Image (cartoon, rainbow, N blue to C red):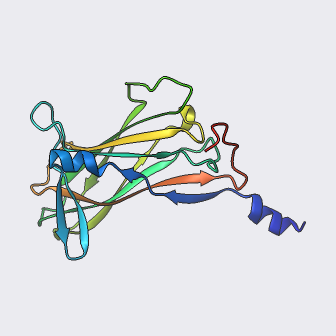
């Protein structure tokens, strides 16, 4: 086989996988609030705090892809925007917690990792889109496992925005091995 073709077939590449949002959790609690901007819909996120606002969070889940390379840190990313004009330099921050496990193990009641991502505004425009990104430590993940994420807005380090940021879209990024792994679970 030609070396160029072999390098394209067997070289790792990054792929997006869309996690499932547990809308029932949000709908049952009525928060975070679902908002519209033209054709765009998203969740308006107030600052999470307990016991005052314990349900200001979004919950996601998916299977760790079988074609993930097994060692590269995956990313959870989201598109955000503020609903009103803000000052340049104002900030908002999100916190991501995650855990992964699967069958033939006890489902843990702990968190594997807590990660934060803060946005500093560079414009005064309302609805200006920014990306938040969370790099998850891959050392305890296994291809095929169930992975769960919890996304919350927390207080920024300084100069908090006045309006609530909105989560408009979310995705994950995985470095893939073209060959993948065998599913011992049969699914």
Residue at 46% in and 47% down: 62
Seen from the viewer's position, the closer of residues 88 and 108 is 108
Q: Position of residue 29 (x, y in %)?
A: 16, 44
Q: Position of residue 32 (x, y in %)?
A: 18, 50
Assign the C terminus to one quadrant of the image: top right
Seen from the viewer's position, the closer of residues 114 and 172 is 172
- Residue lying at the far right in this picture: please name it: 1
Drawn side of residue 159 relative to residue 19, left or right? left
| Quarter occupied by residue 163 | bottom left
Residue at 24% in and 66% down: 41
Residue at 51% in and 47% down: 74
Count numbered badges in the picture. Answer: 0
Q: Position of residue 11 (x, y in %)?
A: 72, 58
Assign the N terminus to one quadrant of the image: bottom right
Drawn side of residue 71 relative to residue 48, left or right? right
Q: Position of residue 50 (x, y in %)?
A: 15, 31
């Amino acid at each position: 086989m030609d070396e160029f073709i072999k390098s394209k077939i067997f070289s790792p590449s990054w792929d997006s996988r869309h996690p499932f949002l547990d809308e029932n959790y949000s709908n049952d609690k009525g928060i975070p609030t679902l908002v519209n901007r033209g054709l765009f819909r998203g969740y308006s996120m107030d600052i999470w705090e307990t016991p005052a606002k314990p349900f200001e969070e979004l919950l996601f889940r998916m299977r760790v892809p079988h074609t993930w390379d097994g060692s590269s840190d995956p990313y959870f990313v989201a598109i955000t925007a503020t609903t009103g004009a803000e000052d340049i330099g104002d900030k908002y921050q999100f916190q991501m917690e995650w855990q992964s496990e699967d069958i033939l193990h006890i489902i843990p009641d702990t968190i594997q990792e807590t990660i934060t991502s803060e946005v500093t505004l560079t414009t005064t425009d309302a609805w200006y889109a920014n990306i938040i990104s969370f790099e998850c430590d891959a050392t305890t993940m296994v291809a095929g496992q169930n992975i769960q994420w919890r996304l919350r807005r927390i207080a920024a380090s300084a100069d908090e925005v006045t309006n609530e940021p909105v989560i408009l879209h979310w995705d994950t990024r995985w470095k893939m091995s073209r060959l993948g792994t065998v599913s011992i679970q049969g699914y």
